[in-house]
Amino acid sequence: MTMPITLLVTIVLSSLLGEAVTLGSILGGVVMVGGLYCVLWAKKTEQVDVSKEQMAAAVQETEV
């Protein structure tokens, strides 16, 4: 699993060791982090929708 902090650590260590950090690697990291947060956002949204459906079903059962 990719953690955003590892990208920051990699950039810091690369600069300390004198390795060149290219634009492609920075853009790749941004795309990876953006994708991770999109997946997490979608998962949270899906869980909220499911809990609302369960709550609506429970209300309908109690009304009957």
Image (cartoon, grey):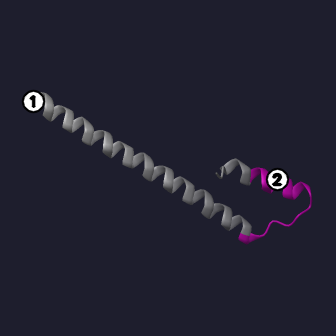
Looking at the rendering, which quadrant does residue 20 occupy?
bottom right
38 to 51, vertically: above or below = below
Label of residue 63 in the image: 1
Q: Earlier in the sequence, mark 2 or mark 1?
A: 2
Residue at 25 percent across and 35 percent down: it is: 55
Q: Residues in magenta?
A: 8-24
Name the amino acid type tagged 1: Glu
Residue at 31 percent across and 39 percent down: it is: 51
Q: Which residue is mark 2?
A: 12
- Using a 10 Å C-alpha cutoff, classify the residue at mark 2 as few (fewer than 14 neighbours), some (14 to 19) or many (20 or more): few
Q: Residue furthest right?
A: 17
Residue 56 horizontal/vertical position (percent): 20, 38
Residue 54 horizontal/vertical position (percent): 26, 38
24 to 1, vertically: above or below = below
* Front position among marks 2 and 1: 1
Q: Residue furthest left?
A: 64
Is residue 42 one of those drawn in magenta? no
Label of residue 52 in the image: none
Residue at 37 percent across and 49 percent down: it is: 46
Residue 1 horizontal/vertical position (percent): 64, 51
Q: Is residue 8 left or right of residue 33?
A: right
Q: Is residue 14 left or right of residue 23?
A: right
25 to 53, vertically: above or below = below
43 to 62, vertically: above or below = below
Instruction: State the separation of the CA atoms marked 2 and 1.
Output: 60 Å
Looking at the rendering, which quadrant does residue 19 occupy?
bottom right
Name the amino acid type tagged 2: Val
